[in-house]
Image (tube, rainbow, N blue to C red):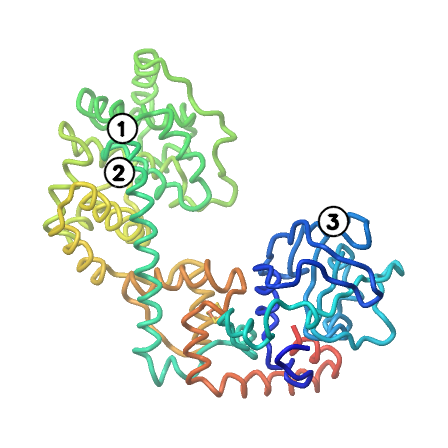
Amino acid sequence: MQGSASSDFDSIPEVALSRIWQEGWLAPELRTTSGERVSVIYRGVWTHAHGPDFRDALVDIGGRIVSGAVELHRRSSDWRKHGHDADPAYDAVALHLVLCDDAHPPLRHRDGRPIPTVELVGFLSAPLDDLVARTGFVELGAIGHGACLPTLAGERELDVRAALREKGWERLFAKQLRFQQELSAFPPAEVLYRGFLDMLGLSANRQGMARLSELLPVTTVERTAADGGSKAVTALLLGCAGFLPLSPGEQALAGLTPAESAEVDQRWDVLRQHWRLRPLPSYSWTLDRVRPANHPVRRLAGFAGLVSGCAPDGLLARFSELLGEAPAAWETWLSSANPPFGSARKRQIQTNLFAPFAYAYAEVQGQHGLVDWVAALWEQLPGAVDDSVAKRTLRQIVGERRFPIRRALDEQGLHQIHHQGCAQLRCFECPIAELAMRYEQPVLYHVDEGIRQLQEEIGHEASHRLREG
Ligand code: SF4
């Protein structure tokens, strides 16, 4: 063993072992505890999730090419402690990598096959402590099992908000980068229009809206608005989307009387021939359990009103005009949609489309003053916790503590932390974990207390598994 005593193994994060395997910081040839040579052909895909640590690896064990999963532990006895011996997900493990092989009797799969095991400490490319230090990972203890910052959110609120804002900025930059890439491929008006439809498709009908925007370029929509007004654009969008003729329920969603709906049908007949259009098939849309306010018919009808209100100059011209007075002017413009968009939708459009699009547009145009202005604006945009991802992440961070979210930056930070951290079990890269490690001692107390109660309720074995993951 290089550089670390067996008793020190407990302080080594298992994620650091995964990193060592991922980076290949090992000798070219390994040996199983039963003496078979092992060479790695492909180390597999790091799962960062439940189940074995790496999937689809390919290894040569004693001259046999074996494909399967790779699992890493500090000690081979952890296999049983973690309940893998009874878990079918671990039947696929082809190689078990451990620092210390202490399992007695030796490990076997559920069907009796022995599990090839390698004691890593004899095959490391450098002392273990050096490799662990190179990974930068630290043991995170109980973080992630309970709320991460149950006391800090009250006592050091500014630190928590700073972490959220850092992640919020990261998300804004990622979004503006996506718009910048699109701006290198499409005209700005097309990018804005596609972004608008994408926002209106959230969350169940983004694909349908994407197909609609491919079928119907912004130039066709704006030309129709300039020539025929609101009813013509409504006919074009709803007809191309495949919703015409509308049922009585859909007429109500679109805010149309039966007579107006009949006019829309007639207009569509003319437009489809004129532009040689074929409507999207009905399976393009997800309508089950979609709330009336989110129904694509309602949203497209509202958008038709907005586009026709921008004629003859078009969406981009109106958007650019309003830049100097945003965000109040954006809010007023979006409120002119009829049928109206909900307040959450309007906020999401400003945060996820208008601000990052304006930023990317200004970058591409070299308008550095505008870039700074959008950056300052991003700080002021309102935010709220009104979707399930933001709600869940906030609860994960602060538990039951009251922690108002009123800025888009904070809200976006929650989404970023969810997608990059909680959903992928990547606490080791999360600024919230950093705060918890530095200040939040009580989290360990709360979890230990929870475990104590659990022990009382369901017995020692189950709670032990909870602690060990
Ligand atoms: S990723 Fe961050 S917020 Fe999520 S559980 Fe881990 S430390 Fe907590």
First in sequence: mark 2 vs mark 1: 2
Q: Which mark is in front, 3 or 1? A: 3
Along the horizontal axis of the image, is 440 left or right of 226? right
Question: Residue at left 75%, top 57%?
Answer: 38
Q: Position of residue 79 (x, y in %)?
A: 75, 70
Check contact, mark 3 vs mark 1: CB within 8 A. no
Q: Amino acid at mark 1?
A: Val
Residue 192 circle label: 2
In the image, 390: left or right of 195?
right
- For the C terminus, the image quarter is bottom right
The kind of residue on which mark 2 rests is Leu
Residues at circles 2 and 1 in contact by the CB criterion of under 8 Å:
yes
Give residue 36's quadrant in the image: bottom right
Mark 3 vs mark 2, foreground winner is 3
**Left of 272 or right of it: where is 119?**
right
Identify residue for label 3: 67
> The residue tagged with tag 2: helix, strand or loop?
helix
Q: Which mark is residue 59?
A: none
Cα–Cα gap, marks 3 and 1: 50 Å
Please give the residue where the numbered disc 1 appears in the rendered image: 218
